[in-house]
Image (cartoon, rainbow, N blue to C red):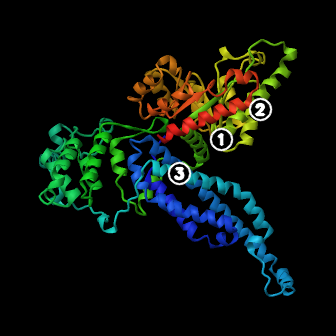
């Protein structure tokens, strides 16, 4: 998942606020309940807008904040869509009203003066309200969830006073020599390079001087001998840093910041761009704690590369160039070519919804309702129906017990029909399918011919699955779901498998079989080098160990027999399954809150 830029999100919020302010007709025609919901949206989004700067900084090292920002962005797009629908309907109602105004006036003449007709009672408006009310309530529910998460993540609202935001000086080709630090020898060498007579090298004519930061570019378009700029000296770096951070010549007026500033300059390692840009982050900020926070951030950014989708990487240089821009009308311009892809936004939203449910509930219930004996083909159909009904009953019992996320093993008879029914009955839950290798498929699967994992994937997606799992990583599935609205959770075991799956495009992985690998101790150990990769623990997990798995770093656990007890399943004791699911949901909630 790519980093969410404050520029793009802030610009989207500003556009929403304009729509809120110009939606007078919307509020008049929307009905009392809808007006109340819209006003809540506006106020809550304004509160969240104040924490965007803090969230953007923290998402680099806090995966939960990054996912919170992604969910907020998705929600903002949904709000934008709803407001557009209102505007369209309001315009249509207005046109219809104008056409019927003449006949309406005739009727109103016969009605006493104290009787008035409300525009919200117009049949079209009533139908429109009923149609959108479910969408509106769903958005409100998601907004409240994000508001709660904001408090849990301790995101801080911060507004930079206007006097602290310095305006950029007008662009000019003139150089202020007082602001040039070091480079005396470099200047002389470059002048000699430009003025050098071509005949001295046995060549004729002029030379084209090309400047670039890439040695590869220099080697391709080479016209003269390379001249590489060296790093700045410590003294020159410090002078540049103090000028851009404090607007001064030294730390004499800010001795409490000197030691921290020296540490920042040292970590910039003589790189002018890093030194200047990070100093710009501190411009006008005299709080030592803010400087210490930047000191930690410099160490992280300058020693790592930030991964983005499709093998693209945000280098430390490009991060430093884009990150410190102040919130202004011009900042969104830098985001237009970055990580903003509205066309895939709907798919992105559903993947994030599934991830949020997995993370917030901490429980994935795994349902396996398959027969344990071979059947003749003549009796297969009726037994498939029986086991499909069993799966349906068990799934309903689990959901009624509080389960938010449920996967059905592919070998379950009628798995896709069960999935379709569950998706229709519980649209806010997340249902998925465990895709199995062909070698463990059951009789009814193998008898219809070769069934490929990719085909199962497509069928599951068409049936409404919000996520897919597999006991191992299947590269074909990763490729297939890149542009689909489904989250794929591949099974991994070793550090090599974890890294390979993540680099292939997996957003989250399943550690399997975790109990055989060491249980919570293995999760704790494997999370240390891979803390940036969300992990689900699976296999042999009991209800009383859920909290420890979450405490050691897993974002969720897969529970199978702990919810769908074999004895209860064999007797179709759905009440027992309901109680086990209720206990599991409470365990997950308690673990997340801790």
Q: Reply above or below: 433 against 261.
A: above
Q: How far apart are marks 1 and 3 (CA)?
A: 17 Å
**Residue 158's image quarter?**
bottom left
**Residue 474 appears left or right of 29:** left
Looking at the rendered structure, which numbered label has been put on residue 417? 2
| Residue at image point 74% right, 74% down | 119
Number of numbered discs on residues: 3
Q: In this view, does 159 lie to the left or right of 498?
A: left
Instruction: State which tag comes first along the sequence, 3 or 2.
Output: 3
Q: Residue at x 76, y 37 (%)?
A: 421
Name which quarter of the figure residue 134 lies in.
bottom right
> Which residue corresponds to mark 3?
146
Q: Where is residue 488 in the image (x, y as percent from the top left)?
A: 58, 32
The residue located at (42%, 27%) in the rendering is: 524
Residue 411 can be seen, yes or no:
no
Q: Is mark 2 on a helix, strand or loop?
A: helix
Q: Is residue 374 visible?
A: yes
Q: Under tag 3, what secondary structure?
A: helix
- Given residues 144 and 13, the one toward you in this image is 144
Q: Against 432, is 141 above or below?
A: below
* Mark 1 or mark 3: whose residue is earlier in sequence: 3
Mark closest to the chain's N terminus, 1 or 2: 2
Which numbered marker is on residue 429? 1
Mark 1 touching mark 2, by CB under 8 A?
Answer: no
> Looking at the image, which residue is at 57% across and 61% down?
41
In contact (CB < 8 Å): disc 3 and disc 2: no
Proximity of marks 1 and 3: CB atoms separated by less than 8 Å? no
């Amino acid at each position: 998942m790519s980093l969410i830029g404050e520029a793009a999100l802030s610009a989207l919020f500003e556009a929403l606020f304009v729509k809120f302010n110009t939606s007078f007709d919307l509020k008049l025609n929307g009905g009392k309940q809808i007006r109340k919901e819209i006003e809540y949206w506006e106020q809550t989004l304004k509160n969240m807008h104040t924490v965007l700067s803090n969230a953007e900084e923290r998402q680099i090292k806090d995966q939960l904040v990054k996912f919170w920002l992604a969910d907020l962005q998705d929600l903002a797009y949904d709000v934008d869509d709803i407001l557009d629908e209102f505007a369209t309907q309001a315009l249509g109602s207005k046109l219809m009203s104008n056409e019927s105004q003449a006949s309406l006036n005739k009727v109103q003449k016969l009605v006493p003066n104290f009787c008035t007709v409300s525009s919200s009672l117009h049949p079209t408006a009533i139908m429109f309200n009923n149609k959108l009310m479910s969408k509106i309530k769903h958005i409100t529910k998601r907004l409240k969830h994000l508001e709660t998460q904001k408090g849990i993540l301790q995101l801080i609202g911060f507004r930079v006073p206007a006097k602290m935001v310095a305006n950029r000086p007008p662009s000019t080709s003139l150089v202020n020599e007082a602001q040039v630090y070091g480079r005396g020898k470099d200047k002389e060498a470059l002048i000699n390079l430009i003025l050098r007579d071509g005949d001295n090298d046995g060549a004729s004519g002029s030379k084209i001087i090309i400047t670039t930061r890439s040695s590869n570019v220099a080697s391709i378009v080479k016209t003269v001998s390379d001249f590489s700029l060296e790093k700045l000296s410590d003294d020159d770096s410090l002078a540049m840093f103090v000028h851009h951070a404090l607007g001064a010549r030294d730390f004499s007026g800010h001795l409490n910041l000197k030691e921290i500033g020296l540490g920042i300059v040292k970590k910039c390692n003589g790189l002018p761009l890093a030194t200047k840009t990070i100093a710009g982050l501190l411009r006008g900020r005299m709080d030592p704690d803010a400087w210490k926070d930047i000191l930690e951030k410099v160490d992280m950014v300058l020693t790592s590369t930030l991964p983005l989708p499709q093998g693209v990487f945000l280098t430390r240089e490009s991060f430093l160039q884009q990150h410190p821009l102040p919130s202004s009308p011009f900042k969104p311009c830098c985001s237009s070519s970055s990580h903003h892809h509205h066309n895939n936004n709907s798919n992105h939203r559903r993947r994030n919804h599934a991830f949020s449910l997995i993370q917030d509930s901490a429980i994935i219930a795994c349902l396996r309702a398959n027969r344990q004996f071979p059947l003749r083909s003549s009796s297969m159909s009726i037994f498939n129906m029986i086991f499909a009904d069993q799966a349906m009953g068990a799934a309903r019992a689990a959901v009624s017990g509080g389960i938010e996320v449920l996967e059905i093993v592919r070998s379950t008879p009628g798995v896709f029909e069960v999935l379709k029914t569950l998706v229709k009955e519980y649209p806010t839950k997340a249902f998925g399918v465990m895709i199995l290798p062909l070698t463990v498929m059951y009789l009814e699967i193998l008898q219809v011919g070769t069934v490929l994992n990719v085909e199962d994937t497509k069928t599951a997606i068409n049936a409404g699955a919000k996520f897919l799992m597999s006991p191992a990583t299947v590269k074909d599935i990763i490729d297939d779901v890149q542009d689909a609205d489904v989250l794929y959770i591949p099974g991994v075991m070793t550090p090599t498998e974890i890294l390979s799956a993540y680099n292939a495009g997996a957003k989250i992985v399943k550690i399997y079989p975790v109990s055989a690998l060491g249980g919570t101790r293995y999760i704790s150990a494997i999370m240390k080098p891979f803390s940036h990769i969300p992990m689900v623990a699976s296999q042999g997990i009991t209800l009383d160990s859920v909290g420890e798995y979450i405490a050691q770093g897993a974002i969720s656990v897969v529970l199978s027999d702990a919810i769908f007890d074999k004895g209860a399943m064999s007797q179709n004791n759905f009440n027992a399954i309901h109680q086990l699911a209720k206990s599991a949901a409470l365990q997950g909630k308690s673990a997340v809150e801790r």
